[in-house]
Each structure stands twice: as C-alpha cells, then as structure tokens.
Amino acid sequence: MDESELIGIVRERAGLRTAREARRAIGATLGALRCALDDLDAAAVAAELPGGLARVVERSAPAVVRSAKALYAETERRERVGLGFAMEHAQVVLQGLAERLDPGLVSRLRKSLPADVAALLKRRRAPAPPPPHVHEHPARRETPIQTLSRSRPGASETIAEARGALAHRASVARTSEPHADRMVSSARSTRPGREDETLATSHGDARRR
C-alpha cells in the first residue's frame, strides 16, 4: 500500500488541511483498530502496510475494543480532536483501508471484528450518475405573417378593420371634386354681396366695352 496515496485519500475525504493531520488521523485509527484485532489478524494487516503504519499495528494492544463506540473513543483518545471529528476520521480511514487492503484480508477482518466495526470496513460507494438532461422547448405559437392589412402600429384595430376617418377633410379621397375651389366654373365671386355666386350660376349683366 502506498502511504502517500492513503494520506491523500484521508486528507481529501475528511477535509483536513495538511498531510500531517491526515497522517495523525490514520495513526490514531490504526491504533484503535489494533485494539479490536487478535494477534494473527494484526500481523496480517501490518504485512500490507508501509513501515511507519505497520509498526502501529504491530504493537501490543493497550485496551480491548469490542464495539464501534469503543473504537471511536480510543481514536479520540489518541488523536485528541474531539469525539465528533474522531468518529469522522475513523470512518474515512477504515473506508480507505477497505479500498487498499487485499480484498481477501478485508473479508477475513469483517468476519472476525465486532459487527458494527466490521461494517466500517467498506468501500466508498461511487456516486450515482446524474439523470439525463432533457431540455423541453416551450410550444411555439404560430405568428401570423404581418401584412399591411394586419399590422397594428399603436392601435387596437388593424388597418383593414379601422372604422375611423381614413383621410383628412381636404383630402382628395373625401370629395368627388377635390379641386373645386380652383376650377373657373365653381370659383366664388369676390364682389361684395355676391360671394356665393360662381361663374356657372352667375346671371349678372355682362357689359361689353
């Protein structure tokens, strides 16, 4: 087993700041685990560990651990970080050991350790893949083609439906004789008293000179 690799795993998963803190958590957990192992199992584990870590497990057990609660208490006694952190660190370290030790040895330890301690020797579950992303486009509303008769610039009615006046009073569109005031036959007289007369209706006495 590569010690630096195990240190990296523990440091990342436990959220520790330095490799020294991770190494301390590993040593405390291995020392507590040794208290739950018999001599044969302890020797088998030590054979799989690098030198510094192997020596922790080779030492004789100063206490007896027969439950996960006792394992956590022993880890906290050695690491001195508070029981909550000690529990978390022990779980991470045992998880890392389960992933790095020989699978046959891990199965053997699970059978010999107390049930709740053996349950901690388990591989980390791979995260489930995210569900496939399905992008749903909103239903598109058919936009009618804008034509001059359908456009509604600033009004509630279309040009085709408009009921208002479509031309101003002097527009050629509102009279049959748009230039009547300029036609000779319909021009109004400018003589006083005869403003309503036109050339066509005038009966004045034309004088020849």
Image: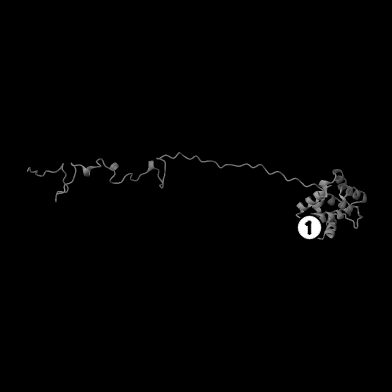
Q: How many marks?
A: 1
Depth order, front residue of 204/23:
23
Residue 177 in picture, x, y percent from top left = 24, 41
The residue under label 1 is 85
**Is 154 on the left or on the right of 89, as rendered?**
left
| Three-letter code for the amino acid on which mark 1 is drawn | Phe
Residue 117 in picture, x, y percent from top left = 84, 51
Crowding at dot 1, Cα within 10 Å, few <14 / some 14-19 / many 20+, comes out as some
Q: Quadrant of residue 31?
A: bottom right
Is any atom of residue 95 visible in this view?
Answer: no
The quadrant in which the C terminus is found is top left
Residue 175 in picture, x, y percent from top left = 26, 42
**Is 79 on the left or on the right of 152, as rendered?**
right
Residue 66 in picture, x, y percent from top left = 88, 54
Residue at 90% over, 50% down: 42
Is any atom of residue 79 visible in this view?
Answer: yes
Identify the element where label 1 is drawn: helix
Q: How is the image coloured?
A: one colour
Residue at 84% over, 44% down: 103
